[in-house]
Image (tube, grey):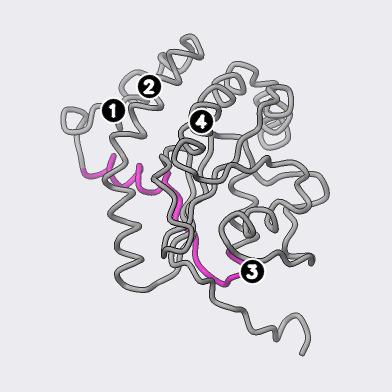
Amino acid sequence: MNGADEVKRLPDWRVLVVGGASGMGKTGVVRALARRYDVPVVEVDDIVEALLAVTLPEHLPDVHFWRTHPEAAHRTPESVVERQIAIARTLEPAIEAVVANHVGTDTPVILEGDYVLPAPATPDGAVRTVFLHEDDEQQVTANYLRREPEAGPQRHRARVSVLYGGWLAAQARAAEVPVVAPRPWEDLADRVAVAAGGTARHDASSSTGRGSPLI
């Protein structure tokens, strides 16, 4: 049996949640895991876009905030992080509904996004959660520059990401949810799979690239 004919093993979870701030490598690792388990990916950004399309700012002011106050993205990093936390808390019921739907219908999925909040860990349950966190602002700046070279070094954004990611990581650890360092990129998919209660598999599909994350 060659690689193209490989029978993919269904995971023992029904929803794998991969959280963490922007620029941490979530996109690359969930793509690798989606190929490994042959399951789809749901991005929290899509949930946000759906809510923006069917609500008005007065209905969900936090979700609409970046559109109604675009200048706020340039405030102090601490101020931006406070707003991100508020948005994440507002989105929590919508994300929980998506997770519950996949568990209830027994349809495996990987859900990822910046606005996911850690729920208390259930290691043997249908929902597994892993957070990614990178403390090095220079590394996160480099990640953004690799992904969006036309924007130049985004140091303010990287500072926001590290601060927000640190808050998320602290919340995750308090809930006994595993927090995984993104580097080294080459075995990140394996390490996330193990943290989620699966097994590692060292092959070409388990890597996000040669030292280059798809963020």
Q: Which tag is nearer the camera, tag 4 or tag 3? A: 4
Tag of residue 62: 1
Label 4 sits on residue: 170
Say whether residue 39 is magenta. yes
Q: Above or below — where is 73 with respect to 67?
A: above
Image quadrant where residue 198 sits: bottom right
Specify whether 50 is left or right of 1: left
Mark 4 vs mark 2, CA separation in Å: 17 Å
- Identify the residue at image location x=43%, y=56%: 122
Label 2 sits on residue: 83
Amino acid tagged 2? Arg
Q: Main secondary structure of the magenta part?
A: helix
Amino acid tagged 3? Arg
Residue placed farthest to the right in the image? 210
Pointer 2 with pointer 1, Cβ within 8 A:
yes
Mark 3 vs mark 2, CA separation in Å: 35 Å
Say whether residue 93 is magenta. no
- Identify the residue at image location x=40%, y=48%: 46
Out of 116 and 208, give the one closest to the viewer.
116
Specify whether 60 is left or right of 9: left
Packing grade of label 1 (10 A; few <14, some 14-19, many >=20) is many
Label 3 sits on residue: 36
- Earlier residue among tags 4 and 2: 2
Q: Quadrant of the N terminus?
A: bottom right
Where residue 94 appears, as percent x and y from the top left, is 28, 47
Packing grade of label 3 (10 A; few <14, some 14-19, many >=20) is some
